[in-house]
Amino acid sequence: MTFLNNNLLFVSNIGYGMYTTPTFDFLGKVESLSNAMIFPINVEEELTDIEEVTSGDGVSCFISHESTKIGGENYISFYKNCDLYQGIGTYIKLPEEISMLPKNQGIEALAISNNGNIVAIEEFGLDKIYHRMWIWNIRNQDYALKTLLYQTDYYVGVSSATFLQDNSLLIVERKTINSLNKLDKTDYQITVNQILSSELYESSGYIVTKQEIIALKNDGKNIASLSENIEAITIKSDLAKVDIFLLSDDQSLNRTVFLQFEFTFDNCGINLNGTKTSIIHDEI
């Protein structure tokens, strides 16, 4: 999920995309989505396991493709002007340690910053706690590949990521009923964590330090149901505030949940200012 000017772009893992125009009320809450267009993404059939779409400049798009077969490769494809319907994707050559990640343990989250830094994150590739992160620059071929570890609680996965305008990174963690099947319902949680840019680019540590900024847990007041699986995150921001948007898949209750959180900026970073929620049903 990503903003392109005033439009939103959604992608599915079976190779379809949707452009739509959000309408905001006077408080900045998304009231509705209109002018929806659903289309097949122009991509080779074996690359249809699409995990993430991201845009660093609001014009061009990068898509991550996770391998769906043993011995298959992971790819990132680039679409100029973000024309996923008729445009032809250019496949970006990846370091071998990324391209040859195992089946269904490939690139789960992908983000690109406005200065061309790419972060790719795999899910459960090492074990059930550590998830490898790779950072490189798409515009600078001499930029050395950097590998970091992102640590979660046991069997908590990583599903999506996006950059803030200060080049810090937001990452979605998930521990859901659907993905873990026999989990006790009290274990459900969705969290969004921030990693400062200094931690990504300047720290000498191998395991990155994170700060939790959003938590959806089974406390009886949860705004999403116990089996929502949040798959995507994106932001819309100005100098004073940032809105963070989360999107689920439709595995639960045959619907897609769209959540919106407003944060304000101060000298210490971002602070949660309010929660604005919307439900997007499959009919849209």
Image: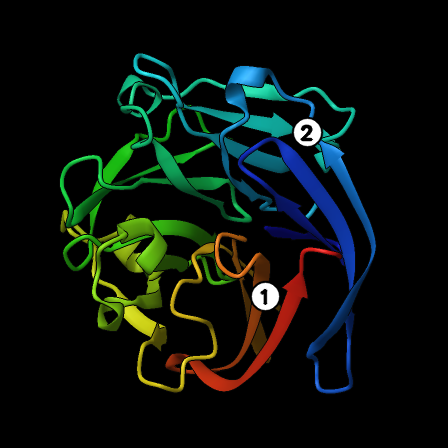
Mark 1 surroundings: few (<14), some (14-19) or many (≥20) residues within 10 A: many
In the rendering, at what x and y percent does residue 77 appear? 55, 26
Q: Amino acid at mark 1?
A: Phe
Answer left or right for 268 relative to 150: right
In the rendering, at what x and y percent does residue 273 appear? 51, 87
In the rendering, at what x and y percent does residue 49 appear? 49, 29
Residue 253 in sight in this render: yes
Q: Which is more N-terminal, label 2 or label 1?
A: 2
In the rendering, at what x and y percent does residue 191 appear? 34, 67
Question: Residue at point 63% right, 74% down?
Answer: 278
Question: Residue at point 47% right, 79% down?
Answer: 223
- Position of 247 relative to 260 (above/below): above
In the picture, which quadrant includes the C terminus? bottom right
Which disc number belongs to residue 27? none
Residue 119 in sight in this render: no
Describe the element under mark 1 as helix, strand or loop.
Answer: strand
Q: Most extreme residue toward the right, as rendered?
A: 35
Describe the element under mark 2 as helix, strand or loop.
Answer: loop
Which residue position is annotated with label 1?
258
Q: Amino acid at mark 2?
A: Ile
Which residue position is annotated with label 2?
41
